[in-house]
Image: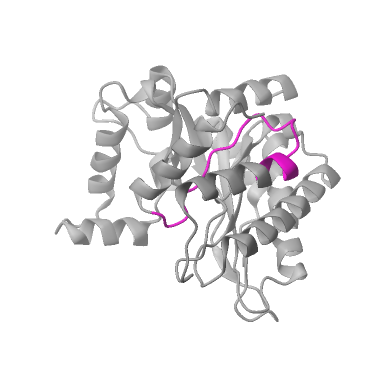
Amino acid sequence: MTGQNLASVAKAMVAPGKGILAADESSPTIKKRFDSIGTESTKDQRRVYREMLFTTPGAAEFISGVILFDETLRQVTADGTPFPQYLATQGMLPGIKVDTGAKPLAGFPGEKVTEGLDGLRERLAEYCELGAKFAKWRAVIVIGDELPTEFCIHANAHALARYAALCQEAGIVPIVEPEVLMDGAHTIERCASVTAATLDEVFVALVNHRVDLGGIVLKPNMVISGTECPERAEVEEVAEVTVACLTAHVPKAVPGIAFLSGGQSAEEATAHLSAMNRLGPHP
């Protein structure tokens, strides 16, 4: 896929009025969800559940793309249509989660680095053949008394950039997802400074790896108080600080931003997003 095609896919992913559906739960995660309703997590049950999501009438009116798990990318609808093909015919872009999870960063207690680069080039080539148009890789940054360290931010930014470069080489749009976690007692100001530092490092790494910024989608955290902060910022402040942080630290070449909820309730995340949109127009 050329740079122009990557850019068109990235823009379609962040089309106005639409969002990206994350249907990429790992097998252990979806088992917990099934356990909560007394349903056994079998391969076919997972297929039926995801088909129910994808075939919802009118879904494409609100969903631009769907992030799939490796298993789901290879599954089919009841009539035998591969999920990626079905989604594409409905006007929803099929995507794929490609990282293998955040693991402890050796030598840095309390911090993590995301793994999955080994064999990624070959996996991306296969995913492209199966119909994937975009991919996702999530990095996590923890805020603590002396965390994050500069090295942790650097290590995760470097991995994100290597992943993004490999995606674009394969003709796949990378979702770049650096998540500053909301766990902890930190203030919104502390979250803003860590988010800014993380974004700066990520974009330096992306540029150094010659990633086309017009062919990515950024998926960041909102700038928000820690869950244990005694005085949590109100909705309007979260919106204002988040927009200010992203405007100052995200290059204008990036086609758009798809927020992650980061553990917020659906109501809280929606209220924040609504308030941000009222502050527009944005880049």
> Which quarter of the image is occupied by the N terminus?
top right
Q: Where residue 31 appears, x then y in whole percent?
A: 28, 59
The verdict on residue 248 being magenta is yes
Report the label total. 0
Q: Nearer the viewer, residue 211 or 169?
A: 211
> Which quarter of the image is occupied by the C terminus?
top right
In this view, 273 is above or below 17: below
* Residue displayed at 68% across by 48% down: 163
In this view, the residue farthest toward the left is 38
Q: Where residue 166 appears, x then y in whole percent?
A: 71, 43
Q: Main SS type for the magenta part?
A: loop
Direction from residue 121 to residue 48 in the image, left or right: left
Q: Nearer the viewer, residue 111 or 232?
A: 232
Q: Nearer the viewer, residue 77 or 173?
A: 173
* Residue displayed at 42% across by 47% down: 269
* Residue displayed at 56% across by 49% down: 98
Direction from residue 136 to residue 61 in the image, left or right: left
Direction from residue 215 to residue 15 in the image, left or right: left
In this view, 28 is above or below 259: below
* Residue displayed at 52% across by 72% down: 185
Q: Nearer the viewer, residue 174 or 272?
A: 272
Type of colouring: one colour
Direction from residue 87 to residue 38 in the image, left or right: left
Q: Where residue 215 appears, x then y in whole percent?
A: 69, 30
Segment colored magenta: 246-264
Q: Where residue 45 appears, x then y in whole percent?
A: 22, 47
